[in-house]
Image (cartoon, rainbow, N blue to C red):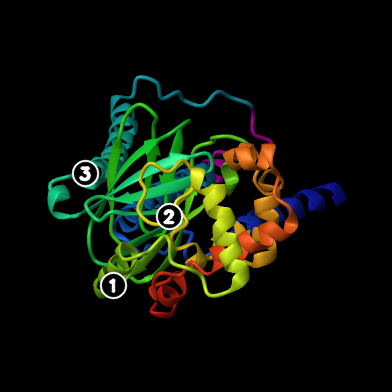
Amino acid sequence: MKGWMGKVRTLLLLSVLPLILSGCGKENLTAFLPKGYGAQVSLDLIVISLIVMIVVFIVVMIIYTMVLVRYRQKKGQENFIPKQTEGNKALEIIWTVIPIILLVIIAVPTVAATFNLADESDKDDSLNVNVTANQYWWHFNYQGEEIQTSQDLYIPTGEKIYLNMISSDVLHSFWVPSIAGKMDTNPENENTMYIEAYEEGVYWGKCAELCGPSHSLMDFKIVAVSPDEFDQWVEDMQNVDPEAEPETASAQEGQELFENSCISCHAIGSSPTALAPNLTNFGDRTAIAGVIDYNKENLVEWILDPEKLKEGNKMSSAPYLVNDELNEEEANQIADYLLQLKPSEITPESANNNE
């Protein structure tokens, strides 16, 4: 009896645990609170599938319970073989047709949604962004705007934004659960999808394809702002002066160090050929390297030893870090320079405040 009760408690615990865990997570990183068209379509398909599965489960459990109760062996009853049902055409037709109907219920809206989300009829009249996936960061090049950003993708709400995606190295997968579904990025060919955000806010994105030791750290943000604010952000980014002199002496020293070393890979302003993340609006970001808490201390640590914080990243093999390692004072000066790169008042913080 004691062992039986232990099994019951274990079963109850395992049953309650999924309900508890279902409450975990973040509002801007879940497909169950859609804030965009693609996410809404995905949720609708999830709901349809869940309804079908729940109905099937309930029907099966009802039949299972009826059989257990009605056909259990009675006390004193002799053993016998029940009447077999093979060859019963009516039953065989029923349990063949019903799964087909259930499959059609799921398949038809799934196929329709797949073709709908792959529609490119509005592409020429919409904003296009070329997305390049790298180990372990994302680069965004706005077609026709001479704007490049990395890690943070700014978009206007209520408009279709077409993303033309490719990888510079291995397979990656672009996924922003709150506003869109997934799309693989391949080195050989370009894949296209569109996203559309209903509300202003900052939505978290993930790489959904195992791509190396820091795959779980390959995060990015989509900053959705109003169309007017987006136009202002575009104008601000286009007017950035890469040679503008910082206000503080430390930042000025950092700018000189940056131009003598970091600029060989990074860029300030429009530079689609840069080998590393574009840092034009680095001062407006909310995370360092996509996942690290945004503050000067962490930035200095990242500059001095990026491998410690994000294993396998290519910055660890940058020439100036290998041949002429920066000291802590120089790293602090570069950090002061990067933190003051704030070309626009349209930031992730302002997008969150407008939610």
Mark 3 / mark 1, whichever is N-terminal? 3
Q: Quadrant of residue 102?
A: top left
Task: Answer whether residue 280 is visible to the viewer in this image.
Answer: yes
Residue 54 at x, y percent in the picture: 43, 51
Between 43 and 248, the residue placed more toward the observer is 248
Residue 43 in magenta stretch? no
Type of residue at label 2?
Pro
Q: Is residue 63 left or right of residue 317?
A: left
Which residue is depicted at the point 23% across and 43% down? 118
Magenta-tinted stretch: 67-78
Q: Are the residues tagged 3 and 1 within 8 Å (C-beta)?
A: no
Between 84 and 97, the residue placed more toward the observer is 97
Please tell me whether mark 2 sits on a helix, a strand or a loop.
loop
Task: Answer whether residue 24 is visible to the viewer in this image.
Answer: no
Q: Which residue is mark 3?
A: 112
Residue 257 at x, y percent in the picture: 59, 55
Q: How many marks?
A: 3
Q: Which residue is mark 1?
A: 232
Residue 205 at x, y percent in the picture: 46, 54
Q: Which mark is residue 177?
A: 2
Q: Which mark is residue 315?
A: none
Which residue is depicted at the point 43% across and 54% down? 177
Depth check, mark 3 against mark 2: the one in front is: 2
Bin the neighbour count of mark 2 within 10 Å (Cα to Cα): few under 14, some 14-19, many 20 and up: many
Residue lying at the far top in this picture: please name it: 87
Type of residue at label 3?
Ala
Q: CA distance from mark 3 to mark 1?
A: 37 Å
